[in-house]
Image (cartoon, helix red, strand yellow):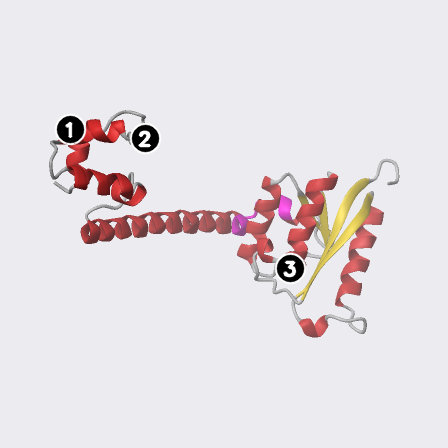
Amino acid sequence: MSRNKIPAIAYLRTSSAANVGSDKDSDKRQRAAIHGFAKANGYELVAEFYDAGVSGADAVTERPGFIAMLDRIAGNGVHTIIVESPDRFARDLAVQLAGHDYLKSLGITLIPASAPDFFLEDTPTAVLVRQVLGAIAQFEKASLVAKLKAARERKRKATGRCEGNKPLAETRPEVVVLARELSASMSYRQISAELANRGYFTRGGKPFAASQIQRMFGR
């Protein structure tokens, strides 16, 4: 690496498979713009990643080339990504800002060659989209919590239980079977003593209480 130059990675994206190939110019144009910007601004490109035929509306975390790039960044300490333009990173504005915020949370700087300050400016539109995305995330979380609560209530009504420790009949059925056999001639306390004598104890290593024996029989 040249002295005093900042290492960076080039990221290219072409949305249509029809624009992919040696006879097409999309990747060539993007590459030329990125290399030209890097040379003029003191960056040295150490790697290139290309998502060919990937929609600009796809979340960045769903793009194979982008994921591979993040894996490379995690291992080589490079913290700068250069793209031709903001829409080459993502055409959808919400995806664009969400993707940038994701990179920012990882300590990665994203620079569009055509507008280097694009992601550094907190324009009213950018602020509004971030607020809307935050509201949507909060709504989705609240909706999920409500759905889970409703599902637990339905299961509780259908089975009589939902959460907490599973009954002994599910986790240690042999204990319940033996206890039932012993109940023909023994009291709860006697059953507890006999279970302990045969090596059956609670998870805490103690003999079963009479109330626990009673619950084994659903009483």
| Residue placed most toward the observer, 21 or 123 | 21
Q: Nearer the viewer, mark 3 or mark 1?
A: 1
Magenta stretch bounds: 119-126
Mark sitting on residue 153? none
Q: Tell me the kind of residue under disc 2.
A: Arg
Identify the residue position indicated by label 2 in the image.
203
| Residue placed most toward the observer, 138 or 144 | 144
Q: Tell me the kind of residue under disc 1.
A: Gln
Measured Cα–Cα span from mark 2 to mark 1 = 20 Å
Task: Give percent across and percent down for residue 29.
Answer: 78, 63
Task: Give percent across and percent down for residue 62.
Answer: 58, 57
Helix, strand or loop at mark 1: helix
- Quick check: can you spot residue 181? yes
Q: Dot 1, how many residues are within 10 Å of its Cα: few (below 14), some (14-19), or many (20+)? A: some
Measured Cα–Cα span from mark 3 to mark 1 = 77 Å
Q: Earlier in the sequence, mark 3 or mark 1?
A: 3
